[in-house]
Amino acid sequence: MKQIFEGIYTDGKSIYTKNLIVGKKVYKEKLIQKNGNEYREWDPYRSKYCAGIKKGLNKSIFYEGCTAIYLGSAEGTTVSHVSDIIGKKGAVFCIDISEIAMNKLTQLAEDRENIYPILSDAQLTENYEEYFTQKADCLFQDISQRNQADIFVRNSKFLKKGGLGALALKTKSISQSESKENILDYELEILKKEFEILQTIPLDPYEKHHYLILMKKK
Amino acid sequence: MEQREFLRKQMLKKTREQIEEKFAGKEIHIIKAVNLLSDLDSINNLMSENLNEWKIRNPQNEAQNQLETLQRNTIQIQEEKTKLIEFIEKEMQEEFPNFSQIATPIIGAKLLSEAGSKKRLCFMPASTIQVLGAEKALFAHLRKNAKSPKHGHLFNHPLLQNMPRFKRGKAARIIAGKLAIALKQDYFKGEDTSKKVKEELEKKIIEIRNEPETEAQKQKEKNYEQINKDRRKEEFVKENKKREHQMESRTFTPEERRAYFANQKRNKDSFTPRENYSNKSKNFGKSKNRTSDSKNDFNQNYNKIGNDKRNRSESKKFKSRGFRKKSKTSFRKRKPRTTKRY
């Protein structure tokens, strides 16, 4: 096992994270035993962050012991891997609007002690302002809405200066007719108000019409 | 660290309460039932259509068994539908005693499912209740200069059924107003005054129906009829074209195909008669084993199409003999796009 980023490993083919709770699966992923440790396979077809790593991400935004904000957590497939990376000292705040998805996430949060679920609309930051007395280290967003970039900028007030952020951009939910390159240019202009853009990655074979954008707060 | 653990437990508790609150509402079962009802309607239509078509063909043995299972399933679905309707009526009577009396329970449930939850529906103004279910027409009206919709799901209301077109908007407005009041009564658990309100409403609507027509309204009605006539004509022409196209692109049984080609050949020969061949081909066209009348009709139909095809093939033949250039199958060049940012 070779380490790419902090807490993320490969064996040449697929990507793994160390399992926080030994012997438990979250979705139907593979478990592998090596050197006395247990690793969980990370599926790039189900997680946009993993697809970004496969396509050559420069920097990983998550590290051990950090506090992260995850907008659009859904049922918690990617969240479980993030909680593997940050370890028991870290914390990940998961925000989602859907009750049915949140119901599954609360079951996950019972086992994993670093997951903090919040049921709210990510556009209305006043709803969960009270939880963030300190500023977070990193911010991740995967929401398919028309004003994705705007939501990301609005939530950046919880992020510290120099903190890293990543946005999984779905271009089809912004415009059906426009080409994805044009949409990306337009969305980057919105993001440049608050962020310095480090890298943009098209997630082509894994997700169509998607980008992963890596940023640093000014 | 202990503070963090405390915070996490509080957050878990809060989200779980929120989820339970959302799931515990009785109206969610009504919404699910109404959505199922509309789905079952479409399923029932599809199955009964299949069943009737199959019945005509005189199925036997194994085919008969398959048909019987289909029949059993369709009957079961119809029974389920009646049970669902009873369930909706009962639940609506408990949750919305005033509202379900004035708007019949099924229409009320449809309005509820469109709004999403009890609270949202009860705090709606009358004007939005009036057009609930006509979202497409409403947004066309807001975006382009289309006419505004008069009614959404309220169109099926029994008081609106026999209303003339130009009075329907006025009546729908009055009914929606009464519905908005009834909803507020139900939400804050007021008295059951539905009988009194219902009588008043019926009186009012009969008054509207008996109002004499103004001349402007008469003129409108005439114009509308003229538009309808034009539309029907267009549809008729379209359908005819479609039918012809269907006949051309249909797959044939071998017998039919033989008859079709024979017809074509005969027509060709009649156009350019050759002395040696003419007698033979005429006999060839009339197939010997012609028994049923339907085949005759079929052949008559194909005479027309044969004529069309002959003309086309004739012109093609003419070109192919000369030095015609090969048709280019290159891609058509696109015009440069004037990019517009949404």
Image: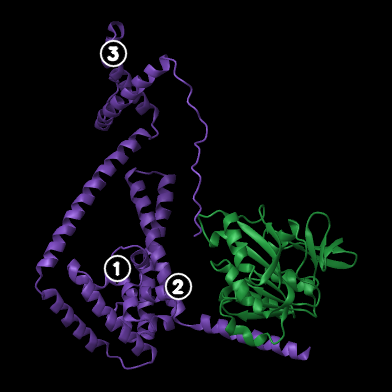
Chain colours: A green, B purple
The amino acid marked with disc number 2 is Lys
Q: Residue A145: horizontal and vertical position, in percent?
A: 55, 67
Which picture quadrant has residue B201? bottom left
- Quarter containing the N terminus of chain B: bottom right
Q: Are marks 2 and 1 on the same chain?
A: yes
Q: Earlier in the sequence, mark 3 or mark 2?
A: 2
Q: Which residue is mark 1?
A: B149
Q: Which residue is mark 2?
A: B32
Q: Are marks 3 and 2 on the same chain?
A: yes
Q: Residue B92: horizontal and vertical position, in percent?
A: 37, 81
Which picture quadrant has residue B192? bottom left
Which picture quadrant has residue B297? top left
Disc 3 versus disc 2: distance between alpha carbons? Answer: 70 Å
Residue drawn 90% across and 65% down? A35
Disc 1 versus disc 3: distance between alpha carbons? Answer: 61 Å
Q: Residue B221: horizontal and vertical position, in percent?
A: 15, 62
The chain under label 1 reads B
The amino acid marked with disc number 1 is Pro
The chain under label 3 reads B
Q: Residue A25: horizontal and vertical position, in percent?
A: 74, 68
In the picture, the disc for residue B272 is 3
Asked whether the residues under the numbered discs 3 and 2 touch, taking CB atoms below 8 Å apart as contact, a structural biologist would say no
